[in-house]
Image: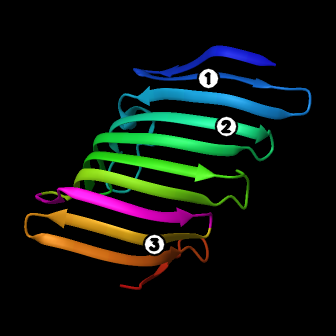
């Protein structure tokens, strides 16, 4: 099966996919697009109001269709969600196999991230995530007043539960 230029459009947002699935159930695909306004696709009853902002995304998927490797590039601009604002946030995420036990390595850089007038000029973070936890190997939040560096983890032990530790 070969797909060229398959489009999904919601309002001003569009995703486009190109790729193949071969006889051995292997996928080789690229999906790219833009979500022009997060509020268009978000549920109206999100705590703190629906998210706002623009998102561009590119996903590269390769391997067995049930658990392909995925590389993702995501850019979030002029966004606000649950009281956190971001002028720009670039996220690179990669997983050797997507599925119920998938683990993603993540690198993020951004500017203008924070709450209201309290925003960091520069944000850089590296870590990993799976369905049960987020590990922050390093994070630096910089502003003219100084910088904060930290590492730690967040765990999701059950529905609605969150625990965390800060190592430094």
Q: Is residue 137 above or below residue 124?
A: below
Q: Residue furthest right?
A: 23
Q: Earlier in the sequence, mark 1 or mark 2?
A: 1
Residue 83 percent coordinates (x, y): 27, 57
Can residue 23 be found in the magenta stretch? no
Queried whether the magenta region covers residue 118, the answer comes back as yes
Quadrant into which the C terminus falls: bottom left
Return the disc, 2 or 3, that comes first in the chain's sequence. Answer: 2
Spatial distance from mark 1 to mark 2, Cα to Cα? 11 Å
Mark-to-mark CA distance, 2 and 3: 25 Å
In-image side of 120 versus 51 (left or right): left
Q: Secondary structure at mark 2?
A: strand
Residue tagged 3? 137
Question: What residue appears at the point 68 percent right and 58 percent down from the top-left corner?
Answer: 102
In the displayed structure image, the side of residue 107 where residue 1 appears, left or right? right
Q: Which residue does the numbered mark 2 point to in the structure image? A: 61
Magenta part, dominant SS: strand
Q: Reply above or below: 152 against 93.
A: below
Q: Secondary structure under badge 1?
A: strand
Q: Is residue 83 visible?
A: no
Instruction: Report the quarter where the N terminus lies.
Output: top right
The residue wearing badge 1 is: 17
Q: State which tag comes first along the sequence, 1 or 3.
A: 1
Q: Position of residue 15 (x, y in %)?
A: 53, 25
Q: Are marks 1 and 2 in contact (CB under 8 Å)?
A: no
Which mark's residue is nearer the viewer, 1 or 2? 2
Start-end of magenta stretch: 117-131
Does the CB distance between marks 2 and 3 fall below 8 Å? no
Rendering coords of residue 95 (x, y %): 64, 52
Q: Position of residue 49 (x, y in %)?
A: 32, 49
Residue at screen point 19% across, 71% down: 147
């Amino acid at each position: 099966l070969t797909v060229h230029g398959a489009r999904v459009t919601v309002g001003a947002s569009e995703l486009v996919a190109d790729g193949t699935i071969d006889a051995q159930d292997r996928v080789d695909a690229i999906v790219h697009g833009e979500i022009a306004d997060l509020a268009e696709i978000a549920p109206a009853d999100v705590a703190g109001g629906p998210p706002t902002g623009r998102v561009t995304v590119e996903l590269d998927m390769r391997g067995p269709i049930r658990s392909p490797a995925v590389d993702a590039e995501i850019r979030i601009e002029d966004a606000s969600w649950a009281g956190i604002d971001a002028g720009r946030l670039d996220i690179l995420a990669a997983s050797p196999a997507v599925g119920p036990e998938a683990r993603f390595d993540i690198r993020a850089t951004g500017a203008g991230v924070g709450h209201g007038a309290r925003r960091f000029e520069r944000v850089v973070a590296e870590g990993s995530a799976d369905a049960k936890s987020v590990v922050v190997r390093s994070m630096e939040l910089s502003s003219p007043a100084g910088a904060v560096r930290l590492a730690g983890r967040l765990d999701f032990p059950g529905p609605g539960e969150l625990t965390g530790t800060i190592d430094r």
